[in-house]
Amino acid sequence: MTIVEKIIAAHSDRAEVRPGEFVTAKVDLVMANDLTAGIAVDQFGKIGVEGVFDPKKVVFVMDHFVPNKDIATAEQVKRLREFAQAQGLIYLENVGIEHVVLPEMGLVLPGDLVVGADSHTCTYGALGAFATGMGSTDIAFAMATGEVWLKVPPTIEFLYCGKASKWVTGKDLILYTIGQIGVDGALYSAMEFTGDAVDALTMDERFTMANMAVEAGAKAGVFRVDDRTLDYVRARAERAFTAYESDPDAEYAQTIEIDASSLEPQISLPHSPDNVKPVSEVAGLRIDQAVIGSCTNGRLDDLRLCAEVLRGRRVHPRVRCIVIPGSQRVFLQAVREGLIEVFLEAGAVVSTPTCGPCVGGHMGIIASGERCISTTNRNFVGRMGSPEAEIFLSNPAVAAASAVTGEICHPEEVAKP
């Protein structure tokens, strides 16, 4: 079996499972946020149970509109806060973005089965977990019973060979992959990321790749647990976990090989994540805003890369550059390392951790006719504000370099040795 099949089998009390089978599986963690938990709470109230199945395994994270941007969001967060307090749930507010916070707090571990009322719950596959997004009604059922009903997905292996060049990150690997297979190329499948180029990635880059598996239609994205994963997890885990690895004779739906050494930084053009081109084919397009952050690229390695480009330079006077650390812990470490000082001296704005502009919430909405380069994960029409604006997706170095020049460019054009 594959990693995903082994995890699902273990949580379904089955010796083995195969793609296409329907199972009822026990969950290790159920998550919802300020955007989705309201519906889950409404549906939970209709089930007829007094409490959640296990308060220590249900977490609410307030991250999309916090600090509260208006009265409506303040009322929503207040309602969820009161529900969480009454139920004794894990409640997180003003700590950061869910998909950054949960791994760094050790709430998700290898071998876990996690469901969340957010499509990018697949981020946790970087830890060797099976994590997937579900609708709020399904989440309500999971909150009440500790179980979910699902179909075992087939697994597609993505084998990344070679050594990526400087300025090519995990974000570029996943953008290129989505560009090759399309937004439905892994529909209801698990994407398993393997190969030398993947083994060389930092944990932060792995989170980025797993995060965007859903942009290819995947049910989950997953990495095997190696020494780098274990170092990350052991520093945070407060409970036992089981790491799974695909069998040598595991059956994959297909294997797709990608030569990482041949890639340059990738850009996703409007209005779909699979509309991908190398930066050399997009260079010169004027921008109005650059956003560096989100659950995709708001971690410490991302901010370090951004600072490497911005250090000693200034953001173009025509451009608004917004840097959003993914969590308070990331923010604090960035302060200690002097990264925040670099951003401010360059003329960027640093925001409190929030999803903010990624979902068109606040902290950087764009107007009609404007063009934004962003390290976020989606560039759909109207995603970041006006439906008449354009969003380009990139890695943090490209976004930072573009902020300096005022147009999309390769980082080497700015951060020359």
Image (tube, rainbow, N blue to C red):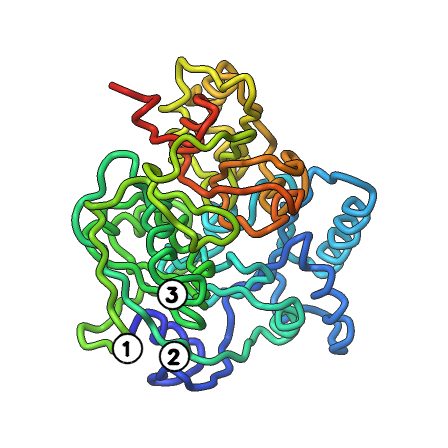
Q: Which mark is residue 55?
A: none
Q: Is residue 414 above or below residue 123?
A: above
The quarter of the picture where the N terminus appears is: bottom left
User: What's under tag 3, amino acid-wise?
Assistant: Gly
Q: Quadrant of the C terminus?
A: top left
Residue 47 location in percent, x, y?
74, 77
Which amino acid is tagged 2?
Answer: Ala
Q: Are marks 1 and 2 in contact (CB under 8 Å)?
A: yes
Q: Residues within 10 Å of mark 2 (few under 14, many from 20)?
A: many
The nearer-to-camera label among 1 and 2 is 1
Q: Is residue 172 left or right of residue 360?
A: left
Residue 404 seen: yes
| Amino acid, disc 1 | Met
Query: Who comes first in sequence, dot 1 or dot 3?
Result: 1
Q: Residue at x 79, y 40 (%)?
A: 70
* Label 3 crowd bin: few (<14), some (14–19), many (20+), radius 10 Å: many
Mark carried by residue 9:
2
Q: Which residue is mark 3?
A: 111
Q: Are marks 3 and 2 in contact (CB under 8 Å)?
A: no
What is the count of numbered marks? 3
Q: Earlier in the sequence, mark 1 or mark 2?
A: 1
In the rendered view, tell whether residue 178 sits above or below residue 93. Answer: below
Nearer the observer, 394 or 149: 394
Q: CA distance from mark 3 to mark 2?
A: 11 Å
**Mark 1, residue position:** 1
Rendering quarter of residue 308: top left
Mark whose residue sits in front, 1 or 3: 1
